[in-house]
Structures are given as C-alpha cells and as structure tokens.
Image: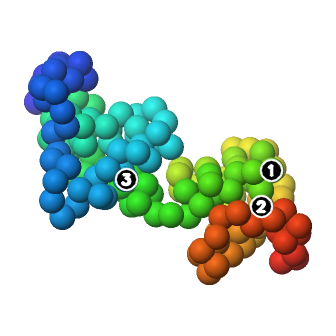
C-alpha cells in the first residue's frame, strides 16, 4: 500500500479560529488540562497531542502521516494522556526548587519517558545507587505533597526520610 504524502501544515488551517475538540461538556476541564500540560512533552509526542487536541486530526490521519498502524498511534496518544493527567510529574515540576538537577532529570526520565531504573542509569551515566536515591527522594516529595496537600514544603523538612 502506497503512503499518501500528508504534511502537518495541511491540518493547521482545517480548524478555523479554534480548537477541534470542543471545550464545552463533561471533559472540558480535562481537555484544557491536557492542552496546558502538553508543553511538558517534547518532539513528536508534543506534536501528536497537539494535532489530536487542537487540530482534530484522527488516529488514522496521523498514522498515515507517520507510516504506522492506527492502533500504534492510539496507544501512544492514550499513554501520553495518562502521563499528562497524572499529577506525579506535575508535583515534581511544582517543587523543582527542592530537587537537584540530577533529580529533575531522573523525574523526567521516569515519569514522562517511562524509563526504568537501569535505562536511566545507562542514559544518564549515573550509578544505580544514585538513581535509586533520586527516585526515593522524588517519591517522598510526591507522597508528602499528596498527603499534606501542600507544595510549599521547607527545604529543611526534606532532609529527613533517609534521603
């Protein structure tokens, strides 16, 4: 089957003056949240989400553009939506002043890219212990905020938890 050349720009003019998905209805708040959090993503993932949400491009149209099966696109977009709706990475971003640069990198690799500890070790050239320590501290910060509902924890309090 021959691939039909379709370009991303073909879809930008398709929806005149607004979003393809309506911002009114039951899921309006989630759609708005997905749009606002899409900046967390990078590259193809961000473009996939924006094409689907803002331009109203179907899974089949995206699959045709990328030359893959529709179900692969559907699974990827659903996975991205789950990542964006999950609050764990958002809590990390909100508390980034409490995290070291290494911890921020590990959090992104773990929550956004879905990398396992061994893959983070390999990608970042960190020791296994360092990645484990970073993840332990990240999860502690997340748990603390979810439990207390506060994001303005003092730095002194975070030195606890054996981290």
* Residue marked by disc 3: 33
Display colour scheme? rainbow
Q: Earlier in the sequence, mark 3 or mark 2?
A: 3
Q: CA distance from mark 2 to mark 1?
A: 9 Å
Q: Earlier in the sequence, mark 1 or mark 3?
A: 3
Disc 1: CA contacts within 10 A as few (<14), some (14-19) or many (>=20): few
Disc 3: CA contacts within 10 A as few (<14), some (14-19) or many (>=20): some
- Is residue 20 visible in the rendered image? The answer is yes
Q: Position of residue 42 (x, y in %)?
A: 49, 36
Disc 2: CA contacts within 10 A as few (<14), some (14-19) or many (>=20): many
Q: Quadrant of residue 59?
A: top left
Q: CA distance from mark 3 to mark 2?
A: 27 Å
The answer to which of 152 and 126 lies nearer the viewer is 152
In the structure shown, which secondary structural element does the residue marked by tag 3 occupy?
helix
* Residue marked by disc 1: 100
Q: Is residue 142 above or below residue 33?
A: below
Circle 2/circle 1 CB separation < 8 Å: yes
Q: Position of residue 31 (x, y in %)?
A: 28, 52
* Residue marked by disc 2: 134
The answer to which of 160 and 63 lies nearer the viewer is 160
Q: Nearer the viewer, mark 3 or mark 2?
A: 3
Q: Nearer the viewer, mark 1 or mark 3?
A: 3
Q: Position of residue 24 (x, y in %)?
A: 16, 54
Q: CA distance from mark 1 to mark 3?
A: 27 Å
Q: Earlier in the sequence, mark 2 or mark 1?
A: 1
């Amino acid at each position: 089957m021959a691939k039909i050349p379709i370009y991303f720009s073909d879809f930008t003019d398709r929806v005149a003056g607004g979003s393809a998905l309506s911002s009114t209805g039951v899921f309006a708040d989630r759609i708005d949240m997905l749009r606002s959090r899409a900046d967390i993503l990078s590259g193809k993932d961000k473009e996939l989400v924006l094409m689907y949400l803002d331009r109203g491009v179907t899974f089949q149209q995206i699959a045709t553009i990328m030359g893959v099966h529709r179900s692969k696109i559907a699974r990827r977009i659903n996975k991205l939506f789950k990542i964006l709706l999950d609050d764990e990475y958002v809590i990390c971003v909100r508390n980034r002043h409490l995290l070291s640069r290494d911890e921020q990198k590990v959090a992104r690799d773990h929550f956004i890219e879905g990398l396992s500890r061994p893959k983070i070790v390999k990608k970042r050239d960190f020791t296994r212990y360092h990645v484990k320590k970073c993840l332990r501290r990240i999860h502690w910060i997340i748990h603390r905020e979810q439990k207390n509902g506060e994001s303005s924890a003092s730095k002194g309090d975070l030195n606890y938890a054996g981290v």
